[in-house]
Image (cartoon, rainbow, N blue to C red):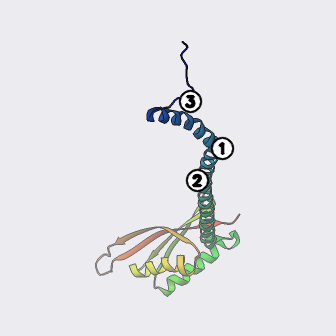
Amino acid sequence: MLKYFDILQKNDYRGKWQLLLWSLLPLLLICYLLAFKKTFNTISEYGSNQEKAQLSNVRKDSASIYDSKLAAVNSWKKQYMLDSSMMDAQVIAAMNMSCDELALNFKEYKPLGLSSQHVWTRMVKVEGAFQSILKLVYELEQTNKICRVTSLDFQKKKGSGEEPDELYCTFYIQNVLKQ
């Protein structure tokens, strides 16, 4: 007799489970291809676009910060720029008047030359009290804004006998020349 093979045989619980797993796998693959893949791509694009937006904001901020700092430096630099036609006259006159007001002796003024960056440096030597010298430096830089003091060198010379001690200050002033 022929053995009869039934296609619709009764499956036990384990058989049904295996059939369900094998049919679920193509179903998940189809779902992934249709929906999940697009969703995951959209989520990853959103994250990368967020990062790009933050970077562009940072770049805009840093560009504006750079521009504001550059404007501040240029305004600071403009304060100490001199026109070559009034270089010595204005600086010497202002220092001479300030020295008279502060009871300082204006001893020496010596131009040292022009650097390759168009910075004009001069050496000035005054004699007097320490506080008066500091007031002179403050007036030159902050009040009159005619030059920038770059270096100070104090020297105290002892007086012989009854003469008082003398305080000499040599300082270097600079200006950026207009071109």
Which residue does the numbered mark 3 point to in the structure image?
8
Q: Quadrant of the N terminus?
A: top right
**Image location of residue 72, percent across then percent down:** 60, 70
**Which residue is most to the bottom?**
101
**Image location of residue 96, percent across then percent down:** 55, 81
Residue 129 at least partly seen: no
* Picture disc at residue 47: 2
Three-letter residue code for mark 1: Leu
Q: Pointer 2 and pointer 1: residues touching (CB < 8 Å)? A: no
Quarter where residue 77 is shown: bottom right
Which residue does the numbered mark 1 point to in the structure image?
34
Residue 153, compared with residue 36, is above or below; it is below
Residue 132 at least partly seen: yes
Residue 171, compared with residue 134, is above or below; it is above
Q: Quadrant of the C terminus?
A: bottom right
Local crowd at mark 1 within 10 Å, few (<14), some, or many (≥20)?
few
**Image location of residue 97, percent across then percent down:** 55, 84
Give the CA distance from mark 1 to mark 3: 32 Å
